[in-house]
Amino acid sequence: MWIVLVTSALTLVSYYRWLRVAQREHYEPTRLFAIEWIWIKARPVEAILLGAVIVVCLASFVLPYGAVIGALLFLGWPVGMSFTGAKRLVWTDRVKRLAGVLLVLHAVVTVLIALFVPAAAGLLPILAVPLAEAALAIMWPIEKAMAKKWQVQAAATIKKVNPKIVAITGSYGKTSTKNYATHLMQGRWSTLASPASFNNAMGLSRAVNDRLQPGTDIFVAEMGTYGPGEIAELTEIFPPEVAAITTIGEAHLERMKSRETIVKAKSEILPKASTVVLNIDVPELALIAENLRASKRVIACSAIPGTAAEVVVTDGALTINNETYAVELPDEVGHPINVAIAVGLALAVEVPIETITQRLASIPGTPHRAEANKTPGGVWVIDDTFNSNPTGAAAALAKAKRLAGESGTVWTITPGMVELGTEQAARNMEFAQAATASDKMRLCIVGRTNRKALRAGEPARTTAFESRKAAADHALTAAKEGDVVLYENDLPDHYA
């Protein structure tokens, strides 16, 4: 019996790691299995080690101490995944509820084993992640139902204050566009934007319940999704008068499987809006814009010179309805198409063109999204760590090359891009090749998740490191005045 109890206690300790992973993966069912698979793919030795843990645990049927030894070994698997991490588990109410359900499931399995098959104690560590996944699956609909009261309160607040709702979605660029648009709108209107990346029902409800005050003219709502139906639900609670799609990309392919599904999911933001702002540099959005012109006000946006669009933003120029204005955007501002969509949104809520052009000069950069700053030693540092999509990565690399000019070297530090489904390896290979395309470019690979794909770059200009700190120390020590260090994406520390 004591072997069952000790094994059970050790397994309970192992749950701390997986609860932390669950929190960092937004409590989504199946994500624990996905992270396990990422480690196994990145470090095949992890499959061997996991197999060894399972064999030792199963040996408990004939060797009683095998259960305890297996549980001890499982505490250290995957090897290299931090148990506590730089960002520790935060014991929120949601985590406490999840942990409570997991504890009940674990207790039931422990009691059944103790009463009927004590020799099966080794199954407890083997079942640890499946039981954690079961707890996530049980709590997912319950948490959704519990959130309804906050959503009802938010809907009532929206109705009472009655702001014009401007909704923004897209595969990427949502937060930057939201911040730019808010800055422009504040030149005329009292404007509240959803904070940070609070882009789901709970986050938006909290923003409204805590911060929306009488007298607010406009509420800018960033809306995210992992699949069809989610944005449609958001627009029921926060019905937009103006809606924008920044772009369609591959950032959600792992979950949504196809580009067509991504287009469908993002387009759910459009039906309730009377004015839509669309990036027509994306073929699917250009087609949607053309189809909607008969029924809605459409403001087409582009970052390609000469495009027939209501708003075009290029280096040093803003074109609105064929009228061109000279503008100079701050260096820390990211990709031009996001600025173009922000201008389109400002026009949609009747911000005067003069106000827009004046405020563009002071438009704020968005932290960690192509944010450029210069060190005292004259080295440019571009922080694009919150970006994980191929188009954004290519744009950030182009910005780095532009800042480096003819003489500077571009040092790219990256773990690569994730959640790209079947395209992930190919897109990381393409980026690695672009990041090592000349003698003035160096690639520093961080971690192992995409190391194999990122090795596709020029070998002589590519170096792998176990951590971002090690890569940064190397690049910043070697970089000289006029060089550029680009931090492209940063994965949470539960990734390999």
Image: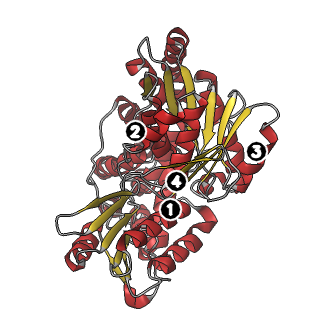
Q: CA distance from mark 1 to mark 2?
A: 21 Å
N-terminal-most mark, 4 or 1: 4
Label 1 with label 2: CB-CB less than 8 Å:
no
N-terminal-most mark, 4 or 2: 2
Characterize the local packing of mark 3: few (<14), some (14-19) or many (20 or more) Cα atoms within 10 angstroms. some
* Residue positioned most to the left: 376
Characterize the local packing of mark 4: few (<14), some (14-19) or many (20 or more) Cα atoms within 10 angstroms. some
Q: Is residue 337 left or right of residue 413?
A: right
Give whichever of 45, 358 is nearer the camera: 358
Discs 4/2, front: 4
SS at mark 4 in the image: strand
Residue at the location (55% across, 62% down)?
391
Label count reads 4
Residue at the location (46% across, 50% down)?
327
Q: CA distance from mark 4 to mark 2?
A: 29 Å
Q: Which residue is mark 2?
A: 196
**The disc labelled 1 sits on which kind of residue?**
Val
Q: Which residue is mark 3?
A: 288
